[in-house]
Amino acid sequence: MWYYFIVFIAAFIVDLVPFFGPPAWTVMVFFQIRYDLNIWIVLVIGVAGSTLGRYVLSLYIPVLSAKVIKTKKNEDIQFIGQKLAKNGWEVQLFVLLYTLMPLPSTPLFTAAGMAKIKPMHIIPAFIAGKFTSDLIMVLTGSYAVKNATAIANGFLSWQTISGTMLGVIIICIFLFIDWHKLLQEKKFRLNFNIWK
């Protein structure tokens, strides 16, 4: 029974870190296969741990960004967060569609946290999308274990590399675009001098 608690903690830790790591579904698949756990309980507990990890990430990332990113850039990112928060259903739809795709959610929560978007604006859609996408991944876990060699090669596949690159691009978009200029003056400007 304590294996389920470990699934929760592992999914929480994996989704707590502000950089790219293994997806939480890999932890769920590992424990489900290794200890022959109930797949539905693993899924529910794993998604709960993952959601809590992303929630905590979105709470502490503004403090971290305040220490490493210039004040002007933090204000700029918060400005875009305020604009996004006004379009509640559009943000929810974007988060839902984003989490349904096989993309890391780290950039989503890093950007949302830095922009100080209230976590409750994105958590419900995240849970729905995360549950659906993780369901697919966990259900195919037994197939993946039977084909371990193909999976080991798959960690460096074009899909994982392109997913990671897309995540980095999303973070760069939030960091390096001057959002005040773009949204107020309709002028596109990049600013790479954002670090303290």
Image (spheres, grey):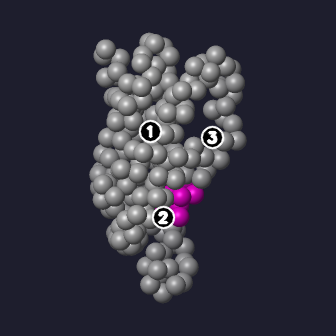
Q: Is residue 22 above or below residue 141?
A: below
Provide the residue span drawn in magenta: 168-175
Query: Label 1, on which residue?
Result: 131
Q: Residues within 10 Å of mark 3 (few under 14, many from 20)?
A: some
Identify the residue at image location x=49%, y=33%.
135
- Label located before the other in sequence (3 or 1): 1
Q: Cα distance, mark 3 to mark 2?
A: 22 Å
x%, y% of residue 161? 64, 43
Give amino acid for label 3: Thr
Q: Residue 152, located in which quarter of the rendered image?
A: top right
Identify the residue at image location x=46%, y=58%.
93
Q: Which mark is residue 174?
A: 2
Identify the residue at image location x=54%, y=84%.
187
Image position of 147 (left or right of 167): right
Tag nearer the camera, 3 or 1: 1
SS for dot 3: helix
Q: Residue 52, located in which quarter of the rendered image?
A: top left
